[in-house]
Image (spheres, coloured by chain):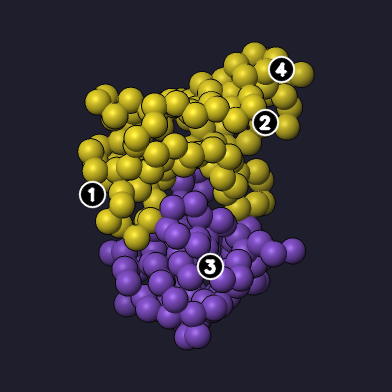
């Protein structure tokens, strides 16, 4: 089955700097890659996603890149703000899996003022 | 609020007791998922419903676990004879087409 690895497990950045989180996946049939943000006491919230027919997607300060050949994808957050502090999860799913998501272990991001 | 609703938010129970959680998905979302999340880990898939049909169950879902979605709307997850290892956050998500999933706030279970 699919295995998703996520690095780093913790990331501390100064406000205004950029943050990058990287994930690798094992199943070449995976074709959908969402990123979720989870704040304390809340459920995961989708922040951006990318499909395998696209190499890069951007939404304001957030961007995701996908390298299908290397089977890795990354989340980029620019101009970080204190409210970006949270746990971020990458995930992957394949078209024939009913949308079942396989998550990475998460990255705790701390943005210091 | 039209998001995914889960109740209760917290449940404390003694080992050996049965517990039941409820999930109300976003209206007209025909796909519903249950995940389990332990501390410091990402959510792990438990089971999936399309309308009222349970189409997939993870090996994580032992025979003490049962899930239903009787009318294709809300769903329940029951754990019988709870064990300390069942302590976790149980998350429900719904989706209109199986890709973008919207999560509820979860039910945190503590088994003493």
Question: Residue A80 falls in which quadrant of the image?
Answer: top right
Residue located beneath label 1 in the image: A1
Say which chain is purple: B
- What is the spatial separation of the Cα atoms under label 3 and label 4, in whole angstroms? 38 Å
Classify 10 Å Cα crowding around label 4: few (below 14), some (14-19), many (20 and above): some
Residue A31 appears in the figure: yes
Is residue A77 placed above or below B16 in the rendered structure? above
**Same chain for the residues at labels 3 and 4, yes or no?**
no
**Same chain for the residues at labels 1 and 3, yes or no?**
no
Classify 10 Å Cα crowding around label 1: few (below 14), some (14-19), many (20 and above): few
- What is the spatial separation of the Cα atoms under label 2 and label 4, in whole angstroms? 9 Å
Is residue A53 placed above or below B7 in the rendered structure? above
Quick check: B93 left or right of A61?
A: left
Residue located beneath label 3 in the image: B29
Quick check: A22 left or right of A82?
A: left
Residue located beneath label 2 in the image: A84
**Same chain for the residues at labels 1 and 2, yes or no?**
yes
Q: Secondary structure at mark 4?
A: loop
Report the residue at 36% width, 75% height from top.
B54
Quick check: B72 left or right of A102?
A: right
């Amino acid at each position: 089955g699919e295995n998703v690895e996520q690095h780093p497990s913790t990331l501390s950045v100064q406000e205004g700097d950029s943050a990058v989180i990287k994930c690798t996946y094992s199943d070449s049939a995976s074709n959908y890659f969402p990123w979720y943000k989870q704040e304390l006491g809340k459920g995961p919230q989708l922040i951006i996603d990318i499909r395998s027919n696209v190499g890069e997607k951007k939404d304001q300060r957030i961007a995701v890149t996908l390298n299908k050949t290397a089977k890795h994808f990354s989340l980029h957050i620019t101009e970080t703000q204190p409210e970006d502090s949270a746990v971020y999860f990458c995930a992957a799913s394949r078209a024939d899996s009913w949308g079942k998501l396989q998550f990475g272990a998460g990255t705790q991001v701390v943005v210091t003022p | 609020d039209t998001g995914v609703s889960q109740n209760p938010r917290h449940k404390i129970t003694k080992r050996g007791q049965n517990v039941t959680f409820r999930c109300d998905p976003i209206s007209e979302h025909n796909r519903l998922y249950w995940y389990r999340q332990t501390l410091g880990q990402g959510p792990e898939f438990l089971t999936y419903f399309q309308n009222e049909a349970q189409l997939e169950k993870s090996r994580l879902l032992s025979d003490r676990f049962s899930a239903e979605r009787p009318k294709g709307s809300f769903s329940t997850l029951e754990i019988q004879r709870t064990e300390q290892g069942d302590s976790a956050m149980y998350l429900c998500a719904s989706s209109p087409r199986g890709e973008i999933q919207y999560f509820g706030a979860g039910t945190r279970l503590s088994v003493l």
